[in-house]
């Protein structure tokens, strides 16, 4: 049984709460034109790209190029496979893809533990996929001491990713203190291309570092800069720790999500700093047991679940925990978003707690009319059910009139939403308090306890 907001008020327990409920003007929460497009669904994307080279597919055994020392010397019998020993040149110009492929192949086939090693220096690297499975179904570790530069031109990319890791198990990708940089060079061309929101056929969004079907892995101490699209993507992966990661792109760079998770389980993202032009972290369909903590987010569009409900047979989102984070100068703080109309699924058991908001525009948002293109049938309610959501101990400041926005579906009402110990101060004093708490659609059980905003 769903309640309209009139009925719902009966169920609200208010202590120290001073709120006025108002209908939203249509576009207040529609998002900027730079909102994320639907997550690129690797599962449904075209098959592995053919690299734009006349060479064999990426994983076919590629002989070391001429530049390398004599292969018979077996440059690496200690299990360390240095790309420069396979012909990579750290001059920032020479395309090093063949050398990287050869070094990877050797490391992957090595009968024992191995390390794929990228020393200091700057390497120009075209799109590449590091495939497994490897010897004994264990991946080489990956050490990136230097800087990798992506080609500037989008035409160099047949694929939706720059550097991909696929079908691998049990490994660490790590940099060092200051090194370990992946520079997507999105600013030079990609960001100027027409975005998916305004173009009928949008340009490719190339993810800088994409992990698909990996498990038992750690990704740490790397910096991702100026991606053309998402910075780091995890798809169909399980048991991954991501920490000490820096992700940096300008506030106005389009679609540059920090980390996007889809169809993946048992993921922890922590002790990292993410400032981008879109969501710092977004958790799409099939995100299960994802824990995010000690993350500094901003600028950007905050930490999001979704967008959901766009595709058929989306898996549920279950078990999300976001805690002990600082969200600074972002468009949204925490947000759950689903498309109007669209497909049914569920998102439940989600907790957002101990979060400091600094000058955030919209700190707490449920948006089931998410439509960045403004070309959806917003009259058709979302079919995504959001339930069992705890939002607790959120403090700080915000700068628009809506501290809390709950735009729930009328067909799949939000259920069991608890706002506890919320303390948010409006940065622009002496303006009407109207509109700070916006509710639309249907809600089944909302509690607001010990909160003010
Ligand atoms: C290889 O790595 C595994 C797991 O990291 C470790 O347990 C094992 O001892 C290593 N083997 C050798 C020969 O170093
Ligand atoms: C996932 O990767 C493992 C190797 O770790 C491989 O054995 C398996 O076939 C891959 N699964 C798919 C669906 O490709
Ligand atoms: C990884 O980064 C952390 C924090 O930036 C630093 O303390 C640590 O020493 C780094 N680890 C390595 C192996 O460089
Ligand atoms: C990390 O940086 C610190 C200070 O800059 C330096 O003393 C240390 O040697 C570095 N460690 C590594 C592994 O590069
Ligand atoms: C969630 O994932 C963590 C590892 O990130 C794991 O320790 C924990 O057991 C998982 N919980 C469930 C309910 O699967
Ligand atoms: C997630 O972790 C739990 C607890 O360790 C485990 O039971 C479950 O199988 C893991 N999920 C996947 C998809 O492996
Ligand atoms: C919480 O975040 C602070 C600041 O980022 C950090 O110093 C602290 O270690 C974090 N604690 C936990 C338990 O994550
Ligand atoms: C909810 O999700 C958390 C992970 O965020 C998990 O530890 C917990 O067991 C889940 N609870 C239920 C009732 O599923
Ligand atoms: C928040 O971000 C602003 C603008 O980037 C910066 O000046 C300020 O120092 C940040 N505040 C905190 C507490 O990190
Ligand atoms: C509330 O969250 C803040 C971080 O915003 C944290 O410092 C504080 O310890 C939390 N309070 C409780 C009671 O957990
Ligand atoms: C808050 O952010 C707005 C832009 O969103 C900016 O104009 C304003 O100066 C910021 N205020 C503070 C106190 O940082
Ligand atoms: C809410 O905050 C108060 C302190 O302000 C604390 O005593 C109480 O435990 C908190 N409640 C919850 C549910 O976190």
Image (tube, helix red, strand yellow):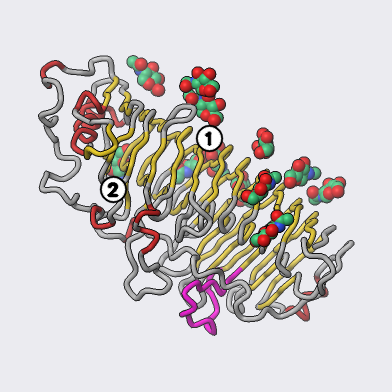
Tell whether 231 sits left or right of 84.
right
Residue 129's label in the rendered image is: none
CA–CA distance in space, label 2 to label 1: 26 Å
* Residue stretch in magenta: 367-384
Vertical arrangement, residue 200 with respect to residue 95, above or below: below
Q: Nearer the viewer, residue 14 or 245?
A: 245
Q: Is residue 268 magenta?
A: no
Residue 359 shows in the view: no
In the rendered picture of this protein, how many numbered marks are placed on residues?
2
The residue at which mark 2 appears reads as 151
Identified at 42% across, 53% down, the residue is: 230
Q: Secondary structure at mark 1?
A: strand
- Outermost residue on the right side: it is 16
Magenta stretch: helix, strand or loop mostly: loop
The picture quadrant where one finds residue 441 is bottom right
The residue at which mark 1 appears reads as 244
Identified at 48% across, 68% down, the residue is: 309
Vertical arrangement, residue 120 with respect to residue 53, above or below: above
Tell whether 9 sits left or right of 304.
right
Label 1 lies in ligand 3 vicinity (Cβ under 8 Å): yes
The picture quadrant where one finds residue 200 is bottom left
Residue 41 rendering spot, x and y as whole percentages? 37, 59
Instruction: Answer few, some or many: residues within 10 Å of disc 1's Cα (few below 14, many 20 plus, some between 14 and 19).
Output: some
Choose mark 2 or mark 1, whichever is in front: 2
Identified at 65% across, 45% down, the residue is: 325
Identified at 46% across, 52% down, the residue is: 260
């Amino acid at each position: 049984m769903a309640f309209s907001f009139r009925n719902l008020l009966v169920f609200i327990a208010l202590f120290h709460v001073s709120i006025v409920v108002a209908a939203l003007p249509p576009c207040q929460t529609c998002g900027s034109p730079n909102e994320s497009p639907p997550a690129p669904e690797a599962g449904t994307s075209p098959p592995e790209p053919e690299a734009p080279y006349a060479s064999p597919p990426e994983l076919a055994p590629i002989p070391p190029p001429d530049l390398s020392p004599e292969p018979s010397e077996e440059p690496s019998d200690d299990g360390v496979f240095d790309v420069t020993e396979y012909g990579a040149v750290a001059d920032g110009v020479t395309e090093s893809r063949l050398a990287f492929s050869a070094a990877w192949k050797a490391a992957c086939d090595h009968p024992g533990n191995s390390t794929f090693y990228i020393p200091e220096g700057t390497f120009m690297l075209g799109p590449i996929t590091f495939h497994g499975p490897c010897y004994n179904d264990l991946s080489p570790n990956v050490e990136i001491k230097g800087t990798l530069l992506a080609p500037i031109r989008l035409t160099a990319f047949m694929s939706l990713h720059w550097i991909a890791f696929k079908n691998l198990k049990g490994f660490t990708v790590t940099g060092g203190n200051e090194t370990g940089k992946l520079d997507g060079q999105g600013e030079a061309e990609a960001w100027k291309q027409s975005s998916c929101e305004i173009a009928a056929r949008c340009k490719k969004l190339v993810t800088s570092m994409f992990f698909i079907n990996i498990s038992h892995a750690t990704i740490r101490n790397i910096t991702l800069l100026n991606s053309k699209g998402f910075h780091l993507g995890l798809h169909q992966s399980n048991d991954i720790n991501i920490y000490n990661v820096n992700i940096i792109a300008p506030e106005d760079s389009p679609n540059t999500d920090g980390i996007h998770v889809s169809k993946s389980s048992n993921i922890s993202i922590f002790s990292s700093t993410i400032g981008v032009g879109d969501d710092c972290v977004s958790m799409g369909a099939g995100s299960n047991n994802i824990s995010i903590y000690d993350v500094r987010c901003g600028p950007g569009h905050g930490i999001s679940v979704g967008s959901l409900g766009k595709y058929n047979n989306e898996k549920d989102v279950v078990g999300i925990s976001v805690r002990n984070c600082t969200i600074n100068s972002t468009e949204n703080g925490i947000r759950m978003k689903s498309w109007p109309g669209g497909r049914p699924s569920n998102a439940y058991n989600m907790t957002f707690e101990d979060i400091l908001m600094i000058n955030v525009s919209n700190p707490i948002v449920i948006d089931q009319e998410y439509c960045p293109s403004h070309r959806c049938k917003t009259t058709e309610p979302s079919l995504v059910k959001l339930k069992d959501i705890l939002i607790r101990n959120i403090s700080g400041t915000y700068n628009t009139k809506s501290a809390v926005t709950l735009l729930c579906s009328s067909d799949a009402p939000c259920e069991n939403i608890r706002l506890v110990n919320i303390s948010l101060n409006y940065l622009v004093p002496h303006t009407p308090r109207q509109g700070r708490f916006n509710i639309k659609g249907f809600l089944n059980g909302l509690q607001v306890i010990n909160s003010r905003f």
